[in-house]
Amino acid sequence: MKKIIVSIVILIMISIPNYSRAFSLSDIFTSGESFISKGKSGGTASAAENETFITILPIAQALVQIGSLVIAVATVIIAIKYLMGTPEKKAELKSQLVGLIVSTVVIYGAQAIWALMYEILNKL
């Protein structure tokens, strides 16, 4: 049973595209030093809109991918347990399914709200 679950999880992980937008350590230090020097010289310390969007976008994409992976794995695990379970266990799994649906709505609802707010505020 464990081997089946592990194989399914590995197949899911392989099939999901993985994008990495990691920064190098020198880029992080360079950006930090330039930010500090702007503050010391009396310049504006606010970030431009594009810089903020470029910084937040990879984080948001990573969170949505992690959430999607967790939802997919949880769905597969619940489905396997449902197929192999007794009628009492199936009733218990149906109640767990409500939590899975709520978490799915929260993850993708938050993404939709963020995209909608970005579009609305971008037009202003």
Image (tube, rainbow, N blue to C red):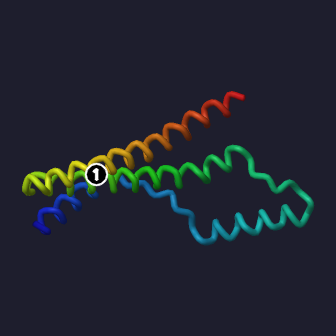
Say left or right for 51 vs 103: right
- Residue in front for this viewpoint, 18 or 6: 6
Task: Check disc 1: other Cα within 10 Å, few if <14, some if 14-19, many if 20+.
Answer: some
Instruction: Describe the element under mark 1 as helix, strand or loop.
Output: helix
Q: Residue at x 14, y 52 (%)?
A: 90
Q: Residue at x 30, y 47 (%)?
A: 98
Tell me the kind of residue under disc 1: Ala
Tell me if residue 31 comes above or below residue 98 in the rendering.
below
- Residue in front for this viewpoint, 44 or 3: 3
Q: Residue at x 39, y 53 (%)?
A: 67
Count of numbered badges drawn on the protein:
1
Tell me if residue 88 comes above or below residue 114 in the rendering.
below
Q: Quadrant of the N terminus?
A: bottom left
Identify the residue at the far top of this view: 123
The quadrant in which residue 108 appears is: top left
Residue 104's x, y, as percent?
A: 37, 46
The quadrant in which residue 119 appears is: top right
Residue 16's x, y, as percent?
A: 31, 51
The quadrant in which residue 105 appears is: top left
Residue 77's x, y, as percent?
A: 20, 57
Name the residue tied to disc 1.
Answer: 72
Say left or right for 71 vs 43: left
Residue 86's x, y, as percent?
A: 7, 56
- Residue in front for this viewpoint, 83 or 20: 83
Q: Residue at x 89, y 56 (%)?
A: 43
